Amino acid sequence: MQYTSTRDSSVRFTASQAITQGLSADGGLLTPYYIPKLPGNALDELKDMPYQARAVYVMKQFLEEFTVKELTDFAAAAYGPEKFDTPAVAPVHTLNESTHCLELWHGPTCAFKDMALQMLPHLLTASLTKTEEFRTVCILVATSGDTGKGALEGFKDVKGTRILVFYPKDGVSAVQELQMVTQEGDNVGVASVIGNFDDAQTGVKRLFSDEALREELDKRGFFFSSANSINWGRVLPQIVYYVSAYCDLLRDEKIQPGQAINVCVPTGNFGNILAAYYAREMGVPIDKLICASNSNNVLTDFIRTGVYDRNRQFYNTESPSMDILISSNLERLLLTLTQDVDEVKGYMQQLNATGRYQVSDKVKEKLQQRFFGYCCDDGETEKVIGRIYAKDRYLVDPHTAVAFSALEQYRAETGDETPCVVVSTASPFKFCGSVLSALGEKNIASGLDVLDQLSEKTGLPAPAPLAGLRGKEIRFTTTVEKAHMVDAVLSMLE
Ligand SMILES: *Cc1c(COP(=O)(O)O)cnc(C)c1O
């Protein structure tokens, strides 16, 4: 299996090169030439296997250079009982005959980023060996919250790696900050940057392009890489849980072999829903893909009109991981729909230059055959949390609630009652404030006390990784000016 760039079809990479490199030199995304089809009996075989074995099977289709033994070791390390609080790893919770919720937050940081970031370090370190890179990879991350902690947990104590995370001093929640500054592991570093997320991100970009720093690191036996969501090593592990969800529904006789399902995905950078699309291409009977957005509804408009336009107001919402105006992974879908790198390149150039592009009628038509877009604001998000809790005694976080709202809207508009898998991307305990307020609570406790408050209100225990923050030692207290991030890097890599 070869990989190519979404902007240049002459690019040819192996899987390990694609994972090592992250991004193509032309700015495009490295993507498989074609999506392999699952053998006819695969779903039937996979349905009786545990999640880890399903992961090996699905990933192997894309990773010829990796042996089954290697992938089996990776899956055991990434999705084992020390990391996930349920042997199912990504369990499906059924609300009613036609509505199922795929819970992707049973990992160490209680958000769906774990599904990919637990696997990526293994794929990356093995890829480095295969491409004969023997320096230590230093992963640099600027984070507005979830990704930083997910990457820290994923790379923690992985041999041959270091990970340094910069978060904005004024841009993460108290719980998120505590999650990062108490991070364990011998190869991790965390510092806050004075300013907001943009300051941290610009600072990290500058580190990546600092030639002098690069040379100094090389002398010390290090080189920089990133773990962001356009790396193929993050998209691939996400295909697995769609295959797995279908297998669970089959195994539990909630659907018949071959029966179509829809999926509904709370979307930001378009990585998660893209993985669903690839699962469909592999042969999982997925019919419609419902793309759910919050008030930052650039994708809703795109799916409905064929016009992508980021020139609009940015909203900070209660589903912050979806507060995104440029959904980078959409570029991979555009390649599939157009089959034309020059067309994709043209759209991306327009996006860079003007913040806007309009796809051809042909592409729009293809898009609308599969994708439906809906959005809702914070008010509706809270109402949905309240409604689902009242009706089904099921507690969802604000991101997941946006998806449930989209599904309600889709069903009302189309009358389509095909069984739907709604993807749940975070534990409600990660967003206690919004969830408590949605349940009618007026006086919301401060700090970590919100965990107890939500537990008492619902009778549900807080996930261990969040409850356990209380007794944890604070290991990182460095705060730097944006201009001094270089010094922070050098001192962390001594
Ligand atoms: C990252 C994230 C999303 C968005 O996923 P994309 O793959 O970027 O579309 C949704 N919900 C949560 C909780 C997330 O952390």
Image (cartoon, rainbow, N blue to C red):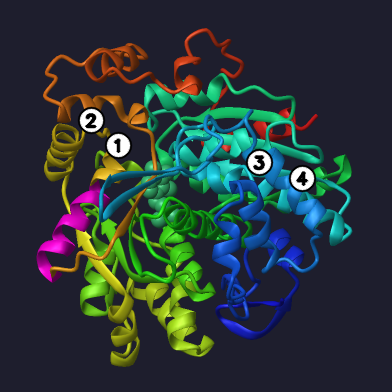
Q: Nearer the viewer, residue 236 or 338?
A: 236
Give the answer, above or below, for where 75 lies relative to 372.
above
Mark earlier in primary sequence (2, 3): 3
Query: In the structure shown, which secondary structural element does the residue marked by tag 2 occupy?
Result: helix
For the residues marked 1 and 4, what is the alpha-carbon distance in whole angstroms?
A: 32 Å
Q: Main secondary structure of the magenta part?
A: helix
Query: In the structure shown, which secondary structural element does the residue marked by tag 4 occupy?
Result: helix
- Provide the residue designation for mark 2: 434
Of circles 1 and 4, the one toward us is 4
Let me know if residue 122 is in the magenta part: no
* Label 1: few (<14), some (14–19) or many (≥20) C-alpha neighbours in 10 Å: many
For the residues marked 4 and 2, what is the alpha-carbon distance in whole angstroms?
A: 39 Å
- Say if mark 4 contacts mark 2, CB within 8 Å: no
Residue at figure coordinates x 59%, y 72% from the top left: 38
* Label 2: few (<14), some (14–19) or many (≥20) C-alpha neighbours in 10 Å: many
- Say if mark 1 contacts mark 3, CB within 8 Å: no
Residue 139, percent across and down?
67, 44
Query: In the structure shown, which secondary structural element does the residue marked by tag 1 occupy?
Result: loop
Q: Is residue 22 visible?
A: no
Kind of residue at disc 1: Asp
Residue 277, percent across and down?
44, 69
Region rendered in magenta: 402-414
- Provide the residue designation for mark 4: 73
Specify the quadrant of the image occupied by residue 246.
bottom left
Residue at figure coordinates x 57%, y 51% from the top left: 205
